[in-house]
Amino acid sequence: MSRYYSSISAVLLLLTVSFNSIAEEVNVYSARKENLIKPLLDKFSAETGIKTNLITAGADKLLTRMANEGRNTPADLLITTDAGRLDRAKRADVLQKIESPVIDKLVPAHLRDVDGQWVGLSQRARVIFYAKDRVNADELSTYEDLADPKWKKRICIRGSSNIYNQSMVASMIAEKGETETLQWAKALVANLARKPKGGDRDQIKAAAAGQCDIAVANTYYFGTMLDNKKDAKQVEAAKKVAVFWPNQSDRGAHVNVSGVGVSKYSKNRENAIRLIEYMLSAESQSWYASVNYEYPVVADVPASELVAAWGEFKSDVLNLSRLGELNAQAVKIMDKAGWQ
Amino acid sequence: MIPSNIRQLGHQSILDRLWQPSIVLTALIFAIPVLTVAGFLFQPSADIWQHLLDTVLIDYIGNSFLLMVGVGLGTFSIGVSCAWLTSVCQFPGKQIFVWALLLPLAMPAYIIAYTYTGMFDFAGPVQTALREWTDWGYGDYFFPEIRSIGGAIAMFSFVLYPYVYLLARAAFLDQSVCVIEVSRTLGCNLWSAFYRVALPLARPAIVAGMSLALMETLADYGTVSYFGIGVFTTGIFRTWFGLGDSVAAAKLAAILLLFVFTLVLVERASRRKAQYHHATNRYQQLPQYQLTGLKAWLACTACLMPLLLGFVLPAVQLGSWALDTYVEMVDESFIRLTLHTVLLGFSASIMAVLLALFLAYGRRVIGSKSVIASIRIVATGYAIPGTVVAVGVIIPFAWLDNTIDGFMREQFDISTGLILSGSLFAVMFAYMVRFLAVSIQSVEAGLGKIKHSMDEASRSLGYKPGQILLKVHLPLMKGSVLTALLIVFVDVMKELPATLILRPFNFNTLAVRAFELASDERLADSSTAALMIVAAGLIPVILLSKSISVSRAGS
C-alpha cells in the first residue's frame, strides 16, 4: 500500500515539477538580433532553469504588437537597440517601473529612464571617422563643425530614415534648439560627398576607398570591420580610417543604448527582473558588449581590448529619454533640410 | 458570359445560392487588414500631412512612378522576348533556358540588392580592382551607381521578370497553332505573327505577370531603403514610426493603393470588352523555327543574360561567401528553421490555391458586380507592404482576442488570453492577404482560357458547377493551378516583414535569418540562409517549368 502512495506522490511531484517548469519562464520581445541575444538567454536558462522564449523584429513593430495585445500580451521584456524606442514604449503605456535597487545602483542615471521604466544594457557611440591619409585629426572638432564649408563634398553619412541619425539630430536639438539644428542640417547636407545610401559600414568603407574623407557612423560597425576574420578587405579598409571623438571639450560624444523595459502586464515579473539583473552582471555585460563591439553600461566592467584601443572618451550625459521626445522634430528637420 | 436570366433557369441547389454571399464574406474577411489601415484615414491628423506635402511627397510619387515605369519596361522586354523565343524557336541551349529562366524567381530582391552592392559598389572588389589596375581615384572614371533608382530598376527587373516570362510562355504555348498558321498564310512573317497575333492574344497573361511584378515592386521595402530611395513604402514607415503619425502614414498607403487601382483600371479600360478565347480546340505541337548562325547566337544571348544577371552571378557570389561561413551557420536550429519555412510555404500555397479556386470559379459562374468587386479588393493585398498588412492583422486580431477574453472574464471568470494573436494562424492569414492576388491571377488566367461554351455544353449535359470544376476545368487548368501553388510557395519562402512581426515565440524562418544578418551588413554570414531559400525555391521552380510544358491543352 505504501508503495502505491509513494508512486502516486511521485506522479504528483512530477506533475508539479513539470507544471512549474511551464510557469518558470520569461518571454522576450527583442529588437536586438537573435545572434546578439540568444546565447545570453540560453546561458541564463541553463543557470537558473527559467525557460526563455524569444521573438525578434523591429522595435516599432514589436511595440505595435505589444500595445494591441494589451493586458493579454505574453511579453515580459521588450529589448530595443535605441533609447528613443524605449521612450516611445513608455509613452504607449506598455511598460512598468522596474523595482530593483540592484539595477539602480549598477546603471548610471543618464542611461536609465527618469521614471525607472527602462534601463540601458550596452552603450554605443556615434562618432566621426576620418581617412588617415587625407585628414589630420587636428582639423576635426565637433559635430557642429561638420557644417563648415571646408568639408564641402567630403562627408559620408547614411539616410535620415535611420534611427541613429534621428537620435543624433535629436541630441543636437536638445543642445542647440530647432532653428540652429535646421541650419546645421542644411549645411551638413550641402557638404555630403554623395547622396545618403547604405548602412553605417558603407560610410566607413566609402571613406577608406576615397569617395569621401570623413564618415559618421556608430563605433561597433567599425569593430565588426576590424575584427572580420573572413574578409581581409574589410580589415584593410577599416585600417585606413581612425576614430575621432567629437565634442570632447563640451558636451561629449553622442551615445545611445540598447536597453530593456518590463512589460506593464508581465506575468513573470520576478523572473523578468532577474533576467535584467543577470544581464547586468559583470560576466554578461562583458559578453553582451563585446559580442557587438559596444561599451558596457556598468562602470567598472571594461570594454573589450579591441574597443578599448580607440581610447577613453567623454560621452554626452543628456538623459536618453529626451531623444525619444525630440524624435519627431528631428525627422521633420531632416526632411526640411533635404536629408534623404 | 451567360445572360443571368438563362442561368436562373437551371436547378439551383442551396450551395449555389450560398455561393455569392460566401464569396463576398470571404473577400471581406481578407480585406480586414486593408480596411483597418484605411480606417486611420478618418482619424484627425496633426500637421504632419501638411509637412509631408511641403517636403517629401513629390519625391515619393516621382520615384515610385519612375520605378514602376522602369520595372514595367524591364520585366516586359525580358519576360516576353524570352518567352517567345523559348516557345517557338529552336536554338542552342533552349532546353535548359526553358526552366532555368525561372530561377531568379527564387532570389529575394533585397538579397540580390545586397549582393550586387557588395560586388559593384565604389568600395567593392570590382571597382577597387579597377582603381588599382588603372591608378584612378574617386571621380576619375564613370561606373554605373548600383544604389540609385536605375540600379533598383535593374534589381527588380532581374528577379521579377520570371512572372511575365512564366505567364507569357504559358499563354504562348496554349495558343492554338491554327491562329499562328493562319496568320502566316495571310502573309505574316514570324515577327509580325508574334507582334500582330500572338502578343495581343497573350495580353491578359502578360498584363497579369506585369501587374504582379509591379505590385511586388511597390510593396518592397528592403531594397529601396538600402538604396536610399524615397518611395511610398519608405515614406509610410518613416511617417508611421519616425514621425509617430499613423494617420498621415495611412494617407500615404491610400495613395499607394490609388496607384494600384489606376494601374488596374487603365488596363481594363484599354481592354474594354474584348475577351481572349481561341475559336477552336484543335491543338497540335507548336511549330518550331530552327534558328541558325547569328540569329541562334542572338537568341541564346538574349536568354542567357537575364539568367546570368538574375541568378548565376549573385548565386556564385553567395556560394563563395557561404563556403567561408557555412560551418558556423549550419547547426540544428538551421535545419529546424529550414523545415519550418518549407512547411509554412507548403501549407500557405495550398490554402491560397483553394481560396483562389473558390473565388475565381464563383466569379465565373455568378459574375455579379458584388462578386467581381470583392475579388478586386482581395487582389490588391499584393501591392501592400508586408509591414502594413501585418499591422492590419495585429489590430483586429488583438481586439477580437481581448474582447473574447473580457467577455469570458466577466461571465465565467476565466481568462482565455490571446487565441489568434501571436499564432501561426495570424501568420497564415497575413500570407493569404498578401498572396491571394498571385493565386487568383494565375487561376483566373487558367479559367479565362477555357471558353464559356464549354461550361454551357457541360451544364447542358447535366453537370453541376462543382462537377464542371472537377471534371472539365481542373484537368484543363492543371498547369495554372500548379503555377499558383508554386509561385505562392516561393513567395512565402521569401516573405519577411509579416512573418517577422506576427510569428509565435521561438519560431524562425530562413528569410528572417537571412535578413537579420544581411541588414546588419553581415553579408557573408547571411549567405547560407539566402542560398537555402534559393535552393528550396529551385525545386518548385523546376517542377513549375515541367508543368507548363505538359499543360498544353490537347497535348
Image (cartoon, coloured by chain):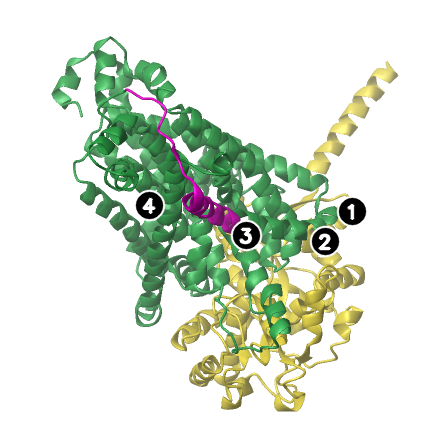
Check contact, mark 1 vs mark 3: CB within 8 A.
no
| Residue type, mark 4 in image | Leu
**Badge 4 sits on which subunit?**
B
Q: Is residue A91 magenta?
A: no
- Separation (CA) of disc 1 from disc 4: 46 Å
Residue furthest to the left in view is B5
Spot occupied by residue A149 in the image (x, y as percentages of width and height): 49, 89
Q: Earlier in the sequence, mark 4 or mark 3?
A: 4
> Would you name the residue on which mark 4 appears?
B35
- The residue at which mark 1 appears reads as A48
User: Residue B454 at x, y = what percent?
Assistant: 24, 18
Q: Which marked residue is nearer to the observer: mark 4 or mark 3?
A: 3
Residue at point 65% right, 86% down? A248
| Residue A92 falls left or right of residue B506 | left
Which tag is nearer the camera, tag 1 or tag 3?
3
Q: Which mark is residue B111?
A: 3
Coordinates of residue B350 in the picture (x, y in percent): 46, 28
- Mark 2–mark 1 contact, CB under 8 Å? yes
Quarter containing the N terminus of chain A: top right
Residue at 34 percent across and 55 percent down: it is B68
Circles 2 and 4: CB atoms closer than 8 Å:
no
User: Chain A's colour?
Assistant: yellow
Q: On residue A274, which mark appears?
A: 2
What segment is highlighted magenta in the picture? B282-310
Say which chain tag 2 marks: A
